[in-house]
Amino acid sequence: MRKPGDDRLVETQRRHWQQTYTAHPDMYGTAPSAPAVHAAEVFRSVGVRTVLELGAGHGRDALFFARSGFDVTATDFSSTGLEQLTAHATESGLAERVTTLQHDVRNPLPLPDDSADAAFAHMLLCMTLSTEEIHSAVAEVRRVLRPGGAFVYTVRHTGDAHYGTGIAHGDDIYEHGGFAVHFFDRVLVEALATGWELREIHPFDEGDFPRRLWRVTQTVPRNA
């Protein structure tokens, strides 16, 4: 089983993303992801003003949230991706609405308790993280969200065609073409919702492959 602190694999993935963003700026385009569009609707319905995005990359979703009227704190462990995000925010006149923060999700968030209205993470939690690290990351999200705060995240799941193939790293992590993924089963999703109100587990496909994902929506109880 892969253990927290497997520095070799972590550093390999860090270099992979730095090189990818450098070679392919705007690799995902400028249009928001479908999960981000859904998340914005959820956030508006519960009166959200501030959004924390984990794993923002070069910022297509962070910029969409900003254009939608939210104040956004965008985090990523790739300095290259965040530099591209900052440049796009400035060019788009959104710099006042977007704050970037270089951060590795394996570490505690450098944010106060109850400091954000909502959080969003598109495929971040299914990166090269152990189950223990995933639990810690979600606990940190819960810490920084206010009571009633919403968390929308997406992950590739064990129904994906890549699950169980490629290079096995243990703990349901498999690597293809230099890209490692932690595939989620339903048990893990439900365990991560402990202490939250689980609103939805929505299956969807993305990309030409296609990737098989779940979009999960959960909220902090208002009496928390």
Image (cartoon, helix red, strand yellow):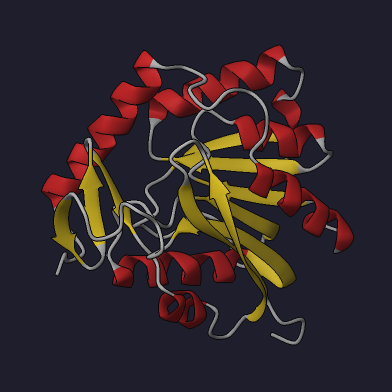
Q: Quadrant of the N terminus?
A: bottom left
Q: Where is residue 7 in the image (x, y as percent from the top left)?
A: 15, 50
50 shown above or below 60: below
Say left or right for 37 vs 165: right
x 37%, y 48%: residue: 104
158 shown above or below 36: below
Q: Can residue 114 be seen in this view?
A: no
The image quadrant of residue 48 is bottom right
Residue 63 is situated, as x and y percent measured from the top left of the image, at 68, 31
Q: Which residue is drawn at 33% across and 32% down?
A: 17
Residue located at (67% from left, 60% from top): 115
Along the line of sight, which residue is nearer the eye, 190 or 137? 190
Residue 6, quarter of the rendered image: bottom left
Nearest the viewer among 203 and 18 is 203
Tell me the quarter of the picture where residue 200 sits. bottom right
**9 shown above or below 117:** above
Residue 160 falls left or right of residue 193: left
